[in-house]
Image (cartoon, grey):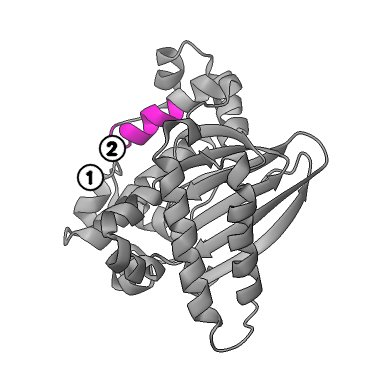
Amino acid sequence: MEFQDMNKKFDIKRIKRTSGFKMQESHSHPFHELFYLESGECTAFIDHNIYTFSKGDFVIVPAGTIHRTDYTGEGVHQRIVISFKTSFTDWISNIVGEDIVASCMETGVVRIPEKRRDYIESIMEKLLFENEGQDPLSPGFINVALVELILFIFRCKRYESNIIKEIDVNNQIMQEIATYIYTHYNEKLVLEDMARQFNLSRSYLSKKFKSSTGFGFKEYIINVRIQHACSLLLETNKSITDIAFECGFNDSNYFGDAFRRIKGISPNKYRKNKENV
């Protein structure tokens, strides 16, 4: 998604999907996303991890994180999706500290204890209600409720039993490959070499990786490289050419074309639009 895909600082909505629904493709966007699964089962590819989760689980997708969700199981799957720009948490950081907010917004899946689900769901109902713009006080109520939600998620994350660490065992090798790419993105990565390294055929790796992550093998490599390039564009004064080579591109023009294709904006304009990211 691009900058214009979310003009408000905050949004929340309830989404229903039928069983077997699959996102057309993995994607990322310049705002944080939290989603709570009210019913059904899901498999999610987030950054380089493949999770399975179900009713009562909270998924944390930080801004810029590559992700894709597939709905498994039977019947209707329902979730509440909360989206907010990174600047929305600035005043929260002033209250509870940057470390708490940063820890809360780390990628992952948190299982909300069953006895506390009514509480967490009541907060989200408040957010849904106030997001309709009841009166001039609604933004204040949204801020307060979001702080309460973030603090509660952080509290849940402090207990080891609430953190979902298990991956989808059927996709374990694909996760290992995605993780390898994610940590070696600036190196030369070739499908044939990777297949040999993981004792797989070239065609099997290509098809299985696509079905598991939503990305083609080369497409994922480019997206990971662009993700790291975004950080360097915003956090350093390095030249665009230097960033291209540092992120594994051997041609700065190709880097520019790939960046525009994925982000919808040139690297230079992305850097200048820092306040909108």
Q: Is residue 87 visible?
A: yes
Q: Of the residues shown, which amino acid type is indicated by label 2?
A: Asn
Q: Position of residue 200 (x, y in %)?
A: 51, 13
Does 185 appear in magenta?
Answer: yes
Q: For this rendering, which residue is in front, 268 or 38?
A: 38
2 and 1 marks in contact (CB < 8 Å): yes
Dominant SS in magenta? helix
Q: Residue at x 63, y 32 (%)?
A: 211
Q: Position of residue 274 (x, y in %)?
A: 31, 70
Rendered image: mark on residue 186: 2
Q: State left or right for residue 90 relative to residue 47.
A: left
- Label 2: how many Cα within 10 Å (few below 14, some 14–19, many 20+): some
Secondary structure at numbered mark 2: loop
Q: Residue at x 37, y 27 (%)?
A: 180
Secondary structure at numbered mark 1: helix
Q: Height in image: 253 above or below 222?
A: below
Q: Position of residue 182 (x, y in %)?
A: 37, 35
Q: Position of residue 121 (x, y in %)?
A: 63, 56
Q: For this rendering, which residue is in front, 178 or 9?
A: 9
Rendered image: mark on residue 179: none
Q: In the image as oriented, which residue stretches furthest toward the right?
A: 75
- The image quadrant that residue 115 belongs to is top right
> Which range of residues does the magenta coloring cover?
177-187
Does 35 appear in magenta?
Answer: no
Q: Residue at x 28, y 68 (%)?
A: 94
